[in-house]
């Protein structure tokens, strides 16, 4: 626990620097693109269009039934989950290589290396918020208007960041020691989308497979986002047992990541 609090203290202490570096990260990633950050939106639209065509047309996916009994078209259900998946995927993958790709520069800087994954995650957060606003407009056009349940996003977004940061402390440390970890993570995450209820409804699974999938903390976040966008329920309250499970698991991941990071960060330069 001591290591976790130390890392959290560093995040709060250097939060201003994290915001500055995250803004610079967005500019540097898109400085050579004519359309700049617009490509983030364009890529997401293309991916959604492909998945919608495959799962909604070729595989003829039917409407999805929410917790309140309401049925919604598959495309809107897909959008509500896919926006979270893109944030999780890009933040987790980019943060895993955040330290070793900058190690020569970081060796000359006077700030803790634990904030490096953080500003990479925050750079994706800005894009994520813009995506949410765009998708809210799309949902509005489709007849799913803004509602009081949107307040849940103020809970689920920080919960997502906390989970990703814990994972990034583990993966960024391991990737610095063994470069192949980043490539392995890339492959696992690309497969993970098919093992998570991003593209398909878990309600169609029976026991024990459905219960096993629910052990994935991403399931909790996906269902929370969908509950918020479609106003079906206060998910983190009605499923309070799962909320407890999510936070226990996320804190455990964060503790492991913090211990791992603090143990090896003094030696990161040795792995150049």
Image (cartoon, rainbow, N blue to C red):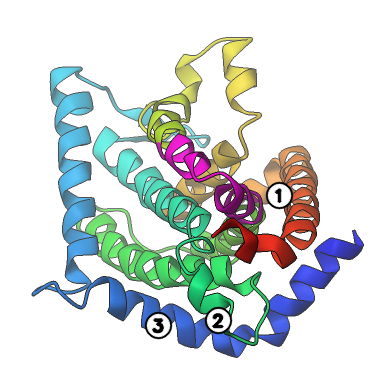
Q: Label 3, on which residue?
A: 23
Say what secondary structure mark 3 lies in: helix
Q: Look at the image and tell me whether residue 73 can be seen.
A: no
* Mark seen at residue 237: 1
Q: Look at the image and tell me whether residue 226 can be seen.
A: yes
Q: Please say whether residue 193 is one of the residues in the magenta stretch.
A: no
Residue plotted at (32% across, 54% down)? 144
Front label number (1 vs 3): 3
In the picture, the quarter occupied by the C terminus is: bottom right
- The answer to whether 33 appears left or right of 151 in the picture is left
* Mark seen at residue 67: none
Residue found at the very far left of the displayed protein: 34
* Residue 207 at x, y percent in the picture: 62, 9
Residue plotted at (63% across, 10% down)? 208
Residue found at the very far top of the displayed protein: 207
Say what secondary structure mark 2 lies in: helix
* Mark seen at residue 18: 2
Q: How crowded is mark 3: few (under 14 residues within 10 Å), some or many (20 or more)?
A: some
Magenta span of residues:
167-186
- The answer to whether 240 appears left or right of 41 in the picture is right
- The answer to whether 251 appears left or right of 178 in the picture is right
Q: Earlier in the sequence, mark 3 or mark 2?
A: 2
Q: Which of marks 2 and 1 is nearer the N terminus?
A: 2
Q: Main secondary structure of the magenta part?
A: helix
Q: Earlier in the sequence, mark 1 or mark 3?
A: 3
């Amino acid at each position: 626990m001591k290591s976790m609090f130390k890392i959290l203290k560093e995040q709060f202490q250097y939060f201003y620097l994290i915001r500055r570096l995250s803004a610079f990260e967005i500019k540097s990633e898109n400085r050579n693109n004519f359309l700049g950050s617009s490509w983030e939106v364009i890529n997401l639209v293309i991916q959604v269009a492909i998945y919608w065509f495959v799962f909604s047309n070729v595989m003829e996916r039917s409407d999805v039934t929410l917790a309140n009994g309401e049925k919604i078209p598959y495309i809107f259900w897909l959008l509500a989950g896919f926006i979270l998946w893109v944030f999780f995927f890009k933040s987790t993958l980019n943060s895993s290589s955040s330290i070793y790709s900058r190690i020569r520069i970081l060796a000359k800087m006077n700030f803790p290396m634990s904030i490096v994954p953080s500003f990479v995650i925050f750079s994706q957060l800005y894009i994520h918020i813009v995506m949410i606003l765009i998708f809210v407009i799309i949902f509005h056009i489709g007849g799913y208007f803004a509602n009081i349940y949107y307040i849940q996003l103020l809970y689920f977004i920080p919960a997502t960041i906390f989970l990703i940061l814990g994972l990034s402390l583990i993966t960024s440390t391991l990737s610095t020691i063994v470069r192949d970890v980043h490539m392995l993570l890339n492959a696992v995450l690309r497969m993970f989308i098919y093992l998570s209820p991003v593209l398909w409804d878990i309600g169609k699974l029976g026991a024990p497979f459905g219960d096993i999938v629910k052990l994935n903390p991403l399931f909790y976040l996906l269902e929370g986002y969908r509950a918020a966008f479609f106003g079906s329920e206060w998910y983190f309250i009605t499923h309070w047992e799962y909320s407890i499970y999510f936070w226990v698991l996320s804190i455990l991941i964060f503790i492991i990541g913090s211990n791992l990071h603090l143990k090896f960060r003094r030696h990161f330069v040795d792995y150049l």
